[in-house]
Amino acid sequence: MATYPVALDTRLAFQMKACTYAEFLAATPLNRTLLAVRGAEARQDAASQWFLAGFPDVLHWIVVVSEESPETAILLPLLARLAASSVRLDLRVVRDTEGFDELAAWLEECGTPDVLNDADLPLLFMFDEDWQLQEQWGPFPQAMEPYLEEWLERHPEYETLAEDETFDPQSTPNAVAEDAVVENGAGGATPEAQAAYAALLDLLGWEMRVWFNSGLDVACAQEICDLMRGLMDEDSEDDGSDSDGSDSDEGDE
């Protein structure tokens, strides 16, 4: 039986758990409608499309998601569209319930052991052709911050209840109306609280659609392209250093 280096085994472990975007859609009962709608409406500007089409290097995009997060339904279809703009980009999806630990182990091999600890999702990791981590992005574009801050001001119960230790995240994805969350005999949130939270989460998801359709799609694409330009600049600097070294050696001869 063939044996492989530990690092290779670690990498293969998470690669086997990662799925394509099409496979994710087929196996995702939650937010399937919103994912489909976003897939049809996600916008990509001409500048980012042109840049991605001409990107010279192979990059593996690994997107870590929580199916329960509204950001996943909004951002993942857009990331899939961006990745489809280039034959050199390969997008795979890792759920926080499947493949997460294996990816964390590989990130530790790459020298970033704590990057997934208490991380907000979704997160995009960019690996080079040799599966070395080059860049990461997420959970949303910086341009979204003022929108989110204003929404949280209107719904302060969202953050309050997200920190409520009696809340059961397996029953609903996140927080509920503050006055609805109380401890029941089992030490969890009441059914009324769970229902109130689900309504609040739906509201956030649909409002995020408005934000992204109004300009954040383009801002997100540009932000990711800027990260990739940084990778190209680093490659250019490395090539320049190699050339300088070669010229210097020839001069010494």
Image: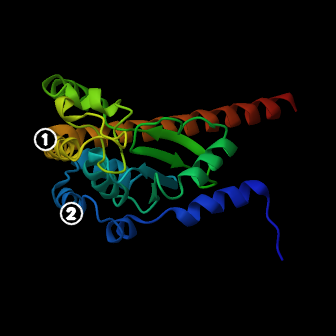
**Badge 1 is on which residue?**
207
Kindly check if marks 1 and 2 are in contact, taking CB atoms under 8 A apart as contact.
Answer: no
Q: Nearer the viewer, residue 18 or 80?
A: 18
Query: What amino acid is found at the position of numbered circle 2 in the picture?
Result: Ala
**Badge 2 is on which residue?**
36
Badge 2: residue crowd in 10 Å (few <14, some 14–19, many ≥20) = few
Q: Nearer the viewer, residue 236 or 63?
A: 63
Q: Nearer the viewer, residue 92 or 153?
A: 153
Q: Quadrant of the N terminus?
A: bottom right
Image quadrant in which you'd find residue 162: top left
Residue depicted at 39% across the width and 42% down the height: 121
Observer able to see residue 232: no
Q: Quadrant of the C terminus?
A: top right
| Relative horizontal placement of residue 46, taking residue 214 as reference (left or right) | right
Q: Nearer the viewer, residue 235 or 225?
A: 225
| Relative horizontal placement of residue 231, taking residue 3 as reference (left or right) | left
Mark 1 to mark 2: distance in Å?
A: 16 Å
Image quadrant in which you'd find residue 91: bottom left
**Residue 49, position in %: x, y?**
29, 52
Image quadrant in which you'd find residue 17: bottom right
| Relative horizontal placement of residue 92, taking residue 12 as reference (left or right) | left
Badge 1: residue crowd in 10 Å (few <14, some 14–19, many ≥20) = some
Question: Which comes before the other along the chain, label 1 or label 2?
Answer: 2
